[in-house]
Image (tube, rainbow, N blue to C red):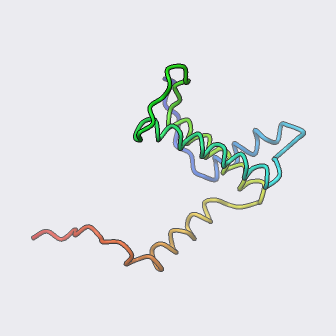
């Protein structure tokens, strides 16, 4: 295991990815290509989840992949996608949580936090 790293904000992650991609002439892929890449990565994640928690065991010759790395691959593509479209994911996250806390406030049964 590598040594522990400092926590990052989503904005910091977006900046790190932008700096990484910025060193290449090709830059970010087109939105359609990134959608295809994200779909591919989500498929790889789904395959791993199915192997660990589903009814489809790995074949003996299949490479062992970690769910955390598959999730990180998805996150990388999402960060690239957001950067390429000039989307601030922290702002988008807060807007999305506001939606859940207002529109969906009573959609699910809340845990009773009152003590008897």
| Residue shown at 54% from the left, 19% from the top | 61
Q: Residue at x 18, y 71 (%)?
A: 114
The quadrant of the rendering that contains the C terminus is: bottom left
Toward the left, the furthest residue is 116
Frontmost residue, 108 versus 55: 55
Q: Position of residue 13 (x, y in %)?
A: 64, 46
**In the rendered view, would you say 58 is above or below 45?**
above
* 82 left or right, relative to 114: right
Is 64 drawn above or below residue 32 in the view shown? above
- Left or right relative to 56: residue 88: right
Number of marks in the image? Answer: 0
In which quarter of the view is residue 31 placed? bottom right
Residue that sits furthest to the top in the current view: 61
**Extreme residue in the right direction:** 25
| Residue 113 vertical position relative to residue 69 in the rendered view, above or below | below
Q: Which residue is found at the position 44% from the left and 76% from the top?
A: 104
Residue 25 horizontal/vertical position (percent): 90, 39
Place of residue 21 in the rendered image (x, y in percent of width and height, measured from the top left): 78, 41
Percent of width and height locating residue 27: 85, 44
């Amino acid at each position: 295991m590598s040594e522990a790293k400092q926590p990052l904000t989503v904005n910091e992650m977006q900046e790190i990815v932008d700096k990484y991609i910025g060193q290449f002439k090709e830059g970010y892929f087109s939105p359609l290509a990134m959608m295809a890449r994200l779909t591919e990565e989500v498929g790889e994640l789904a395959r791993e989840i199915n192997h660990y928690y589903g009814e489809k065991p790995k074949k003996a010759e299949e490479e062992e992949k970690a769910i955390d790395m598959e999730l990180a691959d998805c996150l990388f593509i999402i960060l690239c996608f957001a950067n390429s479209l000039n989307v601030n994911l922290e702002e988008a996250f807060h807007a999305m949580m506001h939606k859940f806390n207002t529109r969906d406030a009573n959609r699910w049964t809340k845990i009773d936090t009152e003590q008897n």
